[in-house]
Image: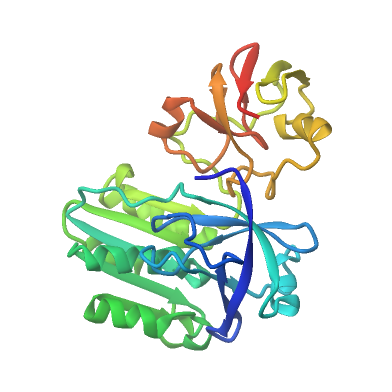
Amino acid sequence: MSNESFDLVVRGLRQESSSVMSLELALPDGRALPQWQPGAHLDIVLPSGLVRQYSLCSDPGDLRRYRLAVLRETNGRGGSEEIHSQTRLGTKLTARGPRNHFKIEDGAAHYLLVAGGIGITPILAMARQLVAAGKSTKVVYCGSSRQTMAFIDEVQEIMGDSLAVYPKDERGRADLLTEIKDAPAGTAVYACGPERLLADLQQITMDTLGAGAFHAEHFAAATPPPSTTGTTDTATDAPFEIELRQSGRTLTVPPEKSVLDVVLEVNPSFMSSCEEGFCGTCETKVLEGEVEHRDTILSEKERAKNDTMFICVSRSKCPKLVLDA
């Protein structure tokens, strides 16, 4: 993962479904792009200044281009509408990354990949890699109708008979319970999609395969699972200090402000987006101190390392944190 920003040029645009458009992006000079693995996404800075996150869904082996896919949400926060209405061939976009908190872990006997709507983007890249590596894999793809489901032909070509498509207008809601119960022992579940889908799937997976089998990427802030150590109770928040090692500044974070709020006061260009602990844009390396994690991104194992934090929501368990910022 890189924290450095770089410019990309739109080299291709394609309508992938009734409401999804894909973008092919390349470096202006055509050099090789930074490497990435399935599950990774880019932070994209739009011409308006909005920052949004989009999963990479191209081939990690082809570093001449990145491919992103964007669902047009007319009642969203404005980013997707800006891309669909204003992006043209030759448009320049600023990017940072790739970053990845949705990596495939080795060692599963079988991989069940579940996508809801635009959640197919990271799942598509995962499916391509797992099948190429000869891993036992099945994809479950849910959507409102075939016309709205991007890359349906591409994922069919990759998966063949190991694809279950659930267009709601044809088949109703996906039978997730049966899909999980039919999965062999040692199955790992990777899912991306709307919160209702992920919540249902997580509960079924925990009850059937165990909590450790479930891995997900969220579109929006989610309630942390019961096993997390974080808290969102702000009533007892205490002030603490942060030392920004790169700038040499030491600042106080009061109870009513986030670390991000304080950092933005001295560095207005610091990149952030969701401010709810799910997108990963504000990830910051921790050099010293113990973090009180409140995000919905890091696993328990990643939290225990105490080497990174999402400063829009997480705080400190000690009087002072030293951050690489």
Residue at 62% across, 24% down? 323
Residue at 25% across, 81% down? 160
Tell me which corner region of the image, top left, top right, bottom left or bottom right, holds residue 291: top right
Q: Nearer the viewer, residue 211 or 42?
A: 42
Seen in the image, is 196 located left or right of residue 239?
left
Seen in the image, is 217 located left or right of residue 174?
right
User: Split into 4 quadrants, where in the image is the C terminus?
Assistant: top right
Q: Residue furthest right?
A: 265
Q: In the image, residue 242 lies at what x, y percent?
A: 69, 19
Residue at 59% across, 49% down? 279
Residue 177 visible in rendering: no
Q: In the image, residue 212 lies at what x, y percent?
A: 31, 43
Tell me which corner region of the image, top left, top right, bottom left or bottom right, holds residue 184: bottom left
Seen in the image, is 240 located left or right of residue 279?
right
Q: In the image, residue 202 lies at what x, y percent?
A: 40, 52
Residue 153 visible in rendering: yes
Q: How is the image coloured?
A: rainbow
Q: Nearer the viewer, residue 227 or 263?
A: 263
Q: Residue furthest top?
A: 319
Q: In the image, residue 294 lies at what x, y percent?
A: 58, 34
Q: How many marks?
A: 0
Q: Nearer the viewer, residue 23 or 222?
A: 23
Answer above or below: position of 272 versus 173: above
Residue at 73% across, 40% down? 270
Answer above or below: position of 193 versus 149: above
Seen in the image, is 298 located left or right of residue 180?
right
